[in-house]
Image (cartoon, coloured by chain):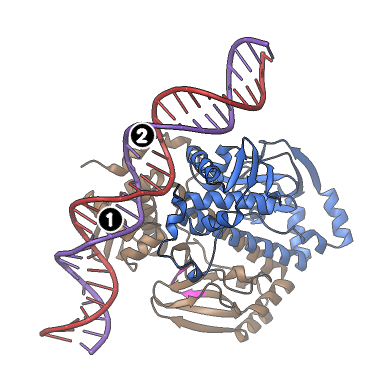
Chain colours: A blue, B brown, C red, D purple
Amino acid sequence: MIFLYLCTVEGVNMTDKKEQYSGCTISTHRCKCFDLLTDEEKRQLETHSVRITYKKGESICKQGSFASHVMYVERGLVKVFLDNGVNLLVLKIIPDCNLLGLTSVNEENNTFQYSAMAYIDTEIVQIDINFFKKLLNQNPAFSKEIINILSSNSIQINGRFFCLTHKQSYGRLADILLCLSDRIFKKTEFELPLSRKELAELSGMSSETVIRMLKKFNEDELIQLDGKRFKVLDYSRLQRISETG
Amino acid sequence: MIFLYLCTVEGVNMTDKKEQYSGCTISTHRCKCFDLLTDEEKRQLETHSVRITYKKGESICKQGSFASHVMYVERGLVKVFLDNGVNLLVLKIIPDCNLLGLTSVNEENNTFQYSAMAYIDTEIVQIDINFFKKLLNQNPAFSKEIINILSSNSIQINGRFFCLTHKQSYGRLADILLCLSDRIFKKTEFELPLSRKELAELSGMSSETVIRMLKKFNEDELIQLDGKRFKVLDYSRLQRISETG
DNA sequence: AAAATAAACTGATACAGATCAGGTTATTTC
DNA sequence: GAAATAACCTGATCTGTATCAGTTTATTTT
């Protein structure tokens, strides 16, 4: 069997490529901004926040609604997306220990700029936005760290932007599978929590195409997929596909 | 002649659409962050910055190189883009009175995360990055405004992301043309400073396709285009195409 | 002003991936 | 545990847009 997705390598010297972009937008490290608060500020933070749990599939915030709070994902996995009623674009996925809804601290945007949904059962801490703004004003180290987070976020989304506009489907799917394995489950074998339709949204293609490509990866022994049971078989070839697709 | 690009309206009730995204990422208002500095800070700013002029087509910064400064576009028009050696993605275009290279204030990224090029003759103020960071630490109002700018930036790029992944070519091209007319030249008739190739990059398609579509817009009397001389003839229909494409 | 180079344009062809129209297998609900 | 619904899968078809291979028109260089 010929590996269609490797044909794209022809004529392109990979060592010439300066940058590799990934469709995966999961941040690799935990948010450390709250460590920068004083004990008093941490105490106040407690009184200005509430903890909420969401079941798999539940909506966490809706684009356009009033943003009275910034959120922190304590546990779980969140899909952040734009939606115009016809099409949907997944901007990023947020794992535990990360902030969510930070763009709403902008005075001119008192509404959520995107929607969010729980991929799996998720625990969120809502922080009062006015208190959050007060922290920004009084604690420069905290404020500096928020600037770091915002700029990291844009860099990641830019990478995903590049990936979705310039990689083809095989590469984008390989990307997402590696992302799940590397950054979310941190093992090569796991139970896939996402449906084919959700994988399709994430890699910016139709669910039929995802199904066909997963089947092909399976046949070619790059992965082993039986229902929800997923295993990476040939990591390096998957990576090659992600880079060249 | 049938308007191909209007066929896509069929079956979709436009009033149902919640959001409209544009491929245009030009910010509408001038950067006001420096107004928030004290007189002393403004004086120090002068001694920590240099002014440089770039000719049309010149490179302003290169992705991956050391970022020793944040930039302010005093005059001109700048293309901000990612490039992996094979493909190119225009992230945004920056008009006068806007900051450039803000993502490099992140401690972990002391290199430029994207490249920039002058579309037209451009004047840039380079601000020493360490002085800029010092301002962030000592002036919360300034820092807050930078957070606002960063979050506005992401929102705009997200919109462009949506547009390039979900609109088709006619809509994306209409978008860019309206953007040039509305936000850059602020009139319906002007001299196009961008080549077909640059329009193609901006709307994420091949230059051949741009040429064919411009010709079609011309035939259908949506625009009038003779060489570089450009005029919007039917604004509202262009807008319909931008929304439905 | 001629030569060289780049930009603009044109037509033919190819193809990745969407869409459509089903089928089958799980999972949820009653 | 049967019915209903959702998820998964399959094959056929269609289409938007890239790519290729030119030609013509501008612009720059000499």
Q: Which quadrant does the N terminus of chain B fall into?
A: top left
**Foreground residue among A96 and C21:** C21
CA gap, disc 1 and disc 2: 23 Å
Confirm whether the magenta stretch covers residue A42. no
Residue found at x 38% / y 45%: B245
Q: Is residue B157 visible?
A: no
Q: For the magenta stretch, what is the residue range?
A: B73-80
Q: Dot 2: what SS?
A: loop
**Which element carries disc 1, helix, strand or loop?**
helix
- Circles 1 and 2 on the same subunit: yes
Chain to which the residue tagged by mark 2 belongs: B
Q: For the stretch drawn in magenta, what is the main secondary structure?
A: strand
Where residue B8 appears, as percent x and y from the top left, is 36, 39
Q: Name the N-terminal-most of marks 1 and 2.
A: 2
**Image quadrant of residue B103?**
bottom right
The residue positioned 76% from the left and 61% from the top of the image is: A33
Q: Disc 1 sits on a residue from what chain?
A: B
Residue A50, above or below B233: above
Where is residue D16? Give x, y as percent: 35, 46
Residue, disc 1: B214
Point 68% across, 64% down: residue: A147
Q: Nearer the viewer, residue B243 or A119?
A: A119
Q: Which mark is residue B10?
A: 2
